[in-house]
Image: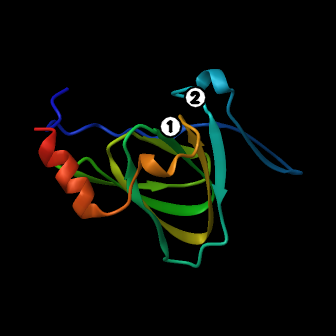
Amino acid sequence: MNSRDKRKIAKIQIGKSLEDRGCLFFLDFEEAPFDPKRVFIVNEVPDGQTRGAHAHHLCEQFLICTKGRIVVIIDDGYCKNKIELFPGEGIIQKAKEWGGQTYYDDAELLVLCSHKYDPSDYIRTYEEFEEMIKNEI
């Protein structure tokens, strides 16, 4: 795929078991798009607040909504995709893609990462991201 081609971002539905006692979401790591090295959860975000707003040089992330509604923006430097996630739905944010998530309805996000935390892997400003994309042409 040429770096200027629009990447089709497909939602991934994880397993769900709903019964009177509650809802259980599940994912066998063999079904994950990479071998997870780190997991974290984002919750208690005020309604309408945006988090993320960064990219990674190497790390890929599997973003899974476990509660509420999350609007995710994925930007590869050429095309911005807006994806709405509901409980049990996820998407992949690849390395070198700018991402941000806006949280609604007491949303919660589970994130599986392809790499351990490394502050040097972060692209923290959009200007730095644009420069990286421009230099890869």
Residue 15, given in percent of the width and then of the height, sits at 67, 35
Residue 27, located in which quarter of the rendered image? top right
Inspect the image, locate mark 1, and give the three-letter code of the amino acid beneath it. Answer: Ile
- For disc 2, the marked residue is 32
Residue, x 66% and y 65% (percent of image)? 43
The one nearer the camera, 88 or 1, is 1
Residue 45, given in percent of the width and then of the height, sits at 60, 73
Residue 63, given in percent of the width and then of the height, sits at 53, 47
The answer for how far apart the CA atoms under marks 1 and 2 are is 10 Å
Farthest top residue? 30
Residue, x 49% and y 52% (percent of image)? 119
Instruction: Tell whether 122 sits left or right of 15.
Output: left
Residue, x 57% and y 28% (percent of image)? 32
Q: Is residue 93 above or below residue 74?
A: above
User: Quick check: marks 1 and 2 in contact, CB under 8 Å?
Assistant: no
Q: Is residue 10 above or below residue 32?
A: below
Give residue 130's mark.
none
Of badges 1 and 2, nearer the viewer stands: 2
Residue 25, given in percent of the width and then of the height, sits at 72, 42
* Element carrying mark 2: loop
Q: Quadrant of the C terminus?
A: top left
Crowding at dot 1, Cα within 10 Å, few <14 / some 14-19 / many 20+, comes out as some
Residue, x 64% and y 40% (percent of image)? 38
The one nearer the camera, 38 or 85, is 38
Q: Is residue 30 above or below residue 38?
A: above
* Element carrying mark 1: strand
Q: Could you tell which of marks 1 and 2 lies nearer the N-terminus?
A: 1
Instruction: Tell whether 20 sits left or right of 8.
Output: right
- For disc 1, the marked residue is 12
